Amino acid sequence: MSKCPGIYNDIGKKARDLLYKDYTQQSQVHYQDRGFGWSLDLAGQINGILPGLGTAFRFMIPYKSKVELQYLHDYAGITAGISSAANPLLNCSGVTGTSFLSLGTDLSYNPATRQFDKYNGGLGVNISILNASLTLNDMGDTLRASCYSSISPLTKTAIAAEFNHQYSRNETTLTFGAQHAIFPVTLVKARASSDGTLGALIQQQLFSSFFLTIAGDVDTRASDNRKISKIGMSLAFRP
């Protein structure tokens, strides 16, 4: 078993993927016109450039793109890269620890303003039945704790929970989610948040590397009926 702690983005990744990945309401900004939105997300990774060194890239159209170098060691993981948007940012993150316990930080520097636009810190704990994380994000304004547990790897059954508190607004949100493969090629996911947001999706594997996802989100507290629900469809290629 590898002792490498991975990279900073791996802290809490399993819980984030279960609770947010492939849903219609995500953190990234998508192009939207008259209620119809679309985006194109391309990501890839090349390993083995040098021992322990690799590169990763991501292009989100029309949002932004990012290219970074990754160095993985038995007890450390370091990334450095640049993201291109209206104002390019220099990104750097580092993690130290083992596959059991990791501690890291994530920074973004804006050359235009000569200031840090982001500095996050977090720790992760990984054991056979539980993946847990605690992070401090948004310049120390947001505290987030999450946990993920795999119940049955054979059926991809898993549960996850997230606690999110924003100090500036004194707002706390709890999110719970679960997933289960009803067939070997059909995965269903659902989530619920204390802010009144409900979501569900069904993902069908069409071929060995192609996946079709139909997802929907409902905001039960929205006052405008036109904004209550959102339905989306995506097609992904994952080799």
Image (cartoon, helix red, strand yellow):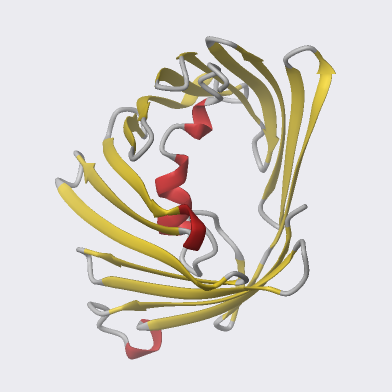
Residue nearest the viewer, comparing 195 with 212 = 212
Q: Where is residue 156? Give x, y as percent.
A: 48, 59
- The answer to which image quadrant residue 214 occupies is bottom right
Residue nearest the viewer, comparing 137 with 76 = 76
Q: Is residue 228 left or right of residue 64?
A: left
Count of all numbered marks drawn on residues in the image: 0
Q: Residue at x 21, y 43 (%)?
A: 165
Q: Where is residue 186? Give x, y as percent.
A: 57, 74
- The answer to which image quadrant residue 229 occupies is bottom left
Residue nearest the viewer, comparing 38 with 151 = 151
Q: Is residue 43 left or right of residue 190?
A: right
The answer to whether residue 198 is above or below residue 123 is: below
The answer to whether residue 157 is above or below residue 172 is: below
The answer to whether residue 86 is above or below residue 124 is: below
Q: Where is residue 148? Give x, y as percent.
A: 35, 46
The answer to whether residue 154 is above or below residue 48 is: below
Q: Residue at x 46, y 80 (%)?
A: 230
- Residue furthest to the left: 170
- The answer to which image quadrant residue 80 occupies is top right
Q: Where is residue 101? Give x, y as percent.
A: 38, 20
Q: Residue at x 28, y 51 (%)?
A: 161
- Residue furthest to the right: 49
Residue nearest the viewer, comparing 155 with 208 = 155
- Quadrant (top left, top right, bottom left, bottom right) of the N terminus: top right
- Residue furthest to the front: 154
